[in-house]
Amino acid sequence: MSPVPAHSALIGEPPFSGSGAFFIARPDAFTTAECAALRGLMEDGTPKAGRLSGGKTVESIRACEILWLDDQPETSWIFERMARILSDINGSAFGFQVEGFNEGAQLIRYDGHERSTYDWHADRGRAPGTLSRKLSISVQITPPDDYEGGCLELNGEGSVITAPRTEGTAIVFPSFVLHRISPVTKGRRTALVAWLHGPAFR
Ligand SMILES: O=C(O)CCC(=O)C(=O)O
Ligand SMILES: [Fe+2]
């Protein structure tokens, strides 16, 4: 496995207390215009109430709206971009054996009026289809001034680190890392999320 790139802009904010970066932030993964187009897909779509993996809606744990995106000709640019970023970052920072997106991507919208949040969880779990998730990607597609709260926080090794919120930045982390979205208290935050699957760790 090659070393984590030294360029600090690519690495989550310090302090790192132990083994090194457990998430990588890639600025300019999507342009401002592309982020606006992605938010437009959410505006034009018919999102569903956010659900926990078990299928039960628990507002206190996750109150958001979700629009699933399939890899169709109109959306393939989104999947191709995420695949390239994931492949780059996996190659330089994680070295996991990965296969592909075995499920659609999600656009997720959190509303300040609802204090929408997504409490601490890991993306890899017992729920069907999630055990083979190996890398998670969340793209900040909302201008940071459009909302308050709504921070992506990660706890990979015992302390909480807040990911950058700059529009267009992709954050990539192993799907077993605990993370949450703190309550949005004003405005609305939309994010693009997907998972790269692969064989079991060994
Ligand atoms: O909104 C985000 O940036 C991340 C959402 C999330 O953690 C998930 O869908 O599993
Ligand atoms: Fe998650």
Image (tube, helix red, strand yellow):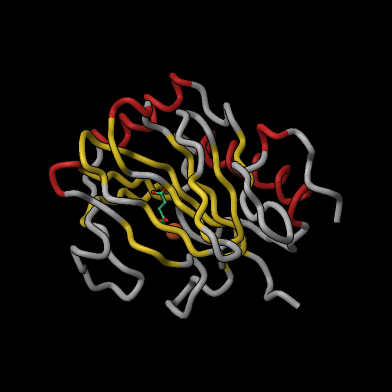
Of the pair 22 and 69, the residue shown nearer to us = 22
Is 117 displayed left or right of 202 in the figure?
left
Q: Is the residue 138 above or below the residue 39 in the image? A: below
Q: Is the residue 33 above or below the residue 86 in the image? A: above
Residue that sits furthest to the left in the current view: 113
Is 37 displayed left or right of 11 in the figure?
left
Quadrant of residue 121 in the image? bottom left
Of the pair 67 and 190, the residue shown nearer to us = 190
Residue that sits furthest to the right in the current view: 2
Measured as percent of width and height from the top left, residue 166 is found at 47, 29
Residue at horizontal 24%, vertical 34%? 43
Is 18 displayed left or right of 170 in the figure?
right
Residue at horizontal 23%, vertical 73%? 56
Q: Is the residue 47 above or below the residue 170 in the image? A: below
Measured as percent of width and height from the top left, residue 85 is found at 65, 40
Quadrant of residue 27 in the image? top right
Measured as percent of width and height from the top left, residue 48 is found at 22, 54
Residue at horizontal 75%, vertical 50%? 93
Quadrant of residue 11 in the image? top right
Is 143 displayed left or right of 72 in the figure?
left
Of the pair 53 and 147, the residue shown nearer to us = 147
- Total labels drawn: 0
Residue at horizontal 58%, vertical 41%? 82
Q: Quadrant of the N terminus?
A: bottom right
Q: Quadrant of the C terminus?
A: bottom right
Q: Is the residue 150 above or below the residue 100 in the image? A: above
